[in-house]
Amino acid sequence: MDLSVRPLAESEWSACRGLIHRAFVDEPFTVEMYGQEMLDRWSGSWDLYSSLQSLDYTLALGACLGDLLVGVVLGSTPGHCTLCQVLALAPRPDEPRHAVEWEFNQNIAQQHSALGEHAWVTKAAVEPALHGLGIGRRLFESAAEALKAEAPAQIVLECAPDRLSFYRRLGYDQVATFPDPAGPDASVMRRWIG
């Protein structure tokens, strides 16, 4: 079966939320935020990602095998960075675990403010059992093509240290590091398109 990458349909957002949840439930930052116990992480991760909505993103692509969603990339087009325009302005949540994500976003916002106009990759995820098959690469190349159609710009994203080599292979350069309240320092990566 051939892999296709296409815009996410509104009807696919439930599957998108589940895929992102499964992809991140075992990540070190999720363990730090919600603890070692799988049920606590599962519940916390779902609580965090179950509210993702299509209205928050102007770029939402899915990698599909037939009708089965196996990967996603979500983001904002140049000049419409959801982090800069929405998340950076949000008040600190009362829930301590959500405050960790809020603090992470505040740290990213400080880095974004120095970049000028940019597109932002918010989330990218591939079904964990399918890592290493080129799905992530296809998603990122499709995202770059879609964003290039908007205007020449820079695409930025943030990543943990273990993802640096993957993004470098995709043409991203590390432009800064910043503190991650739930793990080691994270990196801001940038790729010019257009």
Image (cartoon, grey):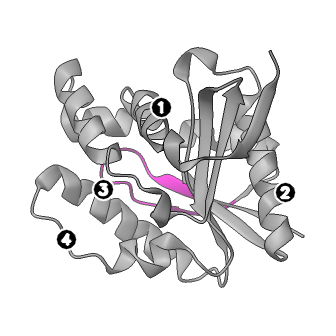
Please name the amino acid that badge 2 sits on. Answer: Glu
Judging depth in this view, the residue of 90 and 53 nearest the camera is 53
Q: Give the residue displayed 46% in from the left and 37% down from the top.
A: 20
Mark 1, Cα crowd under 10 Å, few <14 / some 14-19 / many 20+, is many
Which of the marked residues, 1 or 3, is nearer the chain's N terminus? 1
Q: Is residue 52 left or right of residue 71?
A: left
Question: Cα distance, mark 3 to mark 4?
Answer: 10 Å
Residues shaded magenta: 174-188
Question: Cα distance, mark 2 to mark 1?
Answer: 23 Å
Question: Cα distance, mark 2 to mark 3?
Answer: 29 Å
Please name the amino acid that badge 3 sits on. Answer: Glu
- Disc sitting over residue 101 in the figure: 3
- Disc sitting over residue 116 in the figure: none
Quadrant of the image occupied by residue 43: top left
Q: Secondary structure at mark 1?
A: helix
Mark 2, Cα crowd under 10 Å, few <14 / some 14-19 / many 20+, is few
Q: Secondary structure at mark 2?
A: helix
Q: Is residue 109 left or right of residue 175?
A: left
Please name the amino acid that badge 4 sits on. Answer: Arg
The reply to whether the magenta stretch includes residue 184 is yes
Disc 2 vs disc 3: which is toward the camera? 2
* 4 and 1 marks in contact (CB < 8 Å): no
| Residue behind mark 4 | 92
- Disc sitting over residue 19 in the figure: 1
Mark 3, Cα crowd under 10 Å, few <14 / some 14-19 / many 20+, is some
